């Protein structure tokens, strides 16, 4: 089933906006995470982790879920399909894995924000490389997915190949 052209463009626009938004927020998180590591000021470090948690819940998670859902709509409503091409499957796997890791990591964000909110807690309990590593990996995954979207490398999956073989061919006079 393919979508009407206007609906397809609307779905593509929603997918691009949510995916680029997700990438932008991850870039912001990477910057904050670096500040949390290198800052000598305990209040700045506490502030970084206090800002990261609600931003993750109210911006990062919704954008990740929106990117996943709009990507599914886009793939199911276009000739690319969800399982026909390796590049689409790879993008799906990157998105699903990144979203699951993010949702799992939210417990860590909550813990770090709780420690950061306690003025008597040692700020070094929250200062660690984990947010830098996670944000860097999320950015790399997003950049790979973007590259796949732009270049659309050839390569049908077995399912895609079977579907292509089953399609009736139109003979030209």
Image (cartoon, helix red, strand yellow):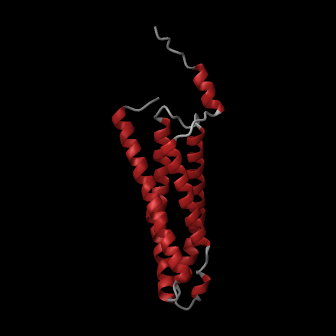
Residue 1, x across and y down, in percent: 47, 29
Question: Which residue is at 38% across, 46% downward?
Answer: 13
Q: Image quarter for residue 5? A: top left
Residue toward you, 150 or 2: 150
Considering every residue shown, the one lying at the far left of the view is 6
In the displayed structure, 45 sits above or below 145; it is below
Residue at 48 percent across and 65 percent down: it is 27
Q: What residue sits 60% from the left and 63% below the top?
A: 104
**Relative to the observer, which residue lies in front, 51 or 118?**
51
Q: Position of residue 166 (x, y in %)?
A: 59, 20
Tell me the quarter of the picture where residue 114 sits: bottom right
The quarter of the displayed image where residue 168 is located: top right
Residue lying at the far right in this picture: please name it: 158
Q: Is residue 144 above or below residue 172?
A: below
Q: Which residue is the extreme one toward the bottom?
A: 120
Q: Residue furthest top?
A: 173
Q: Looking at the picture, how far across and down is residue 108, in whole percent? A: 59, 71
Picture layout, residue 76 above or below residue 166: below
Query: How many numbered marks have been drawn onto this rendered protein structure?
Result: 0
Report x, y in % for residue 29.
49, 69
């Amino acid at each position: 089933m393919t979508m009407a052209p206007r609906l397809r463009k609307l779905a593509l626009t929603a997918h691009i906006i949510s995916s680029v938004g997700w990438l932008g927020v991850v870039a912001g998180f990477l910057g904050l995470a670096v500040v949390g590591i290198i800052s000598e000021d305990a209040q700045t470090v506490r502030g970084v982790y206090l800002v990261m948690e609600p931003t993750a819940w109210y911006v990062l998670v919704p954008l990740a879920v929106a990117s996943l859902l709009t990507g599914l709509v886009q793939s199911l409503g276009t000739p690319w399909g969800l399982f026909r091409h390796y590049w689409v499957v790879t993008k799906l796997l990157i998105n699903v894995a990144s979203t699951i890791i993010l949702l799992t990591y939210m417990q860590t964000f909550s813990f770090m924000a709780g420690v950061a909110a306690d003025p008597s807690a040692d700020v070094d309990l929250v200062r660690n490389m984990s947010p830098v590593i996670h944000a860097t990996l999320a950015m790399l995954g997003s950049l790979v997915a973007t590259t796949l979207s732009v270049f659309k490398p050839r390569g049908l999956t077995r399912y895609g190949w079977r579907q292509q073989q089953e399609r009736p061919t139109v003979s030209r006079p």
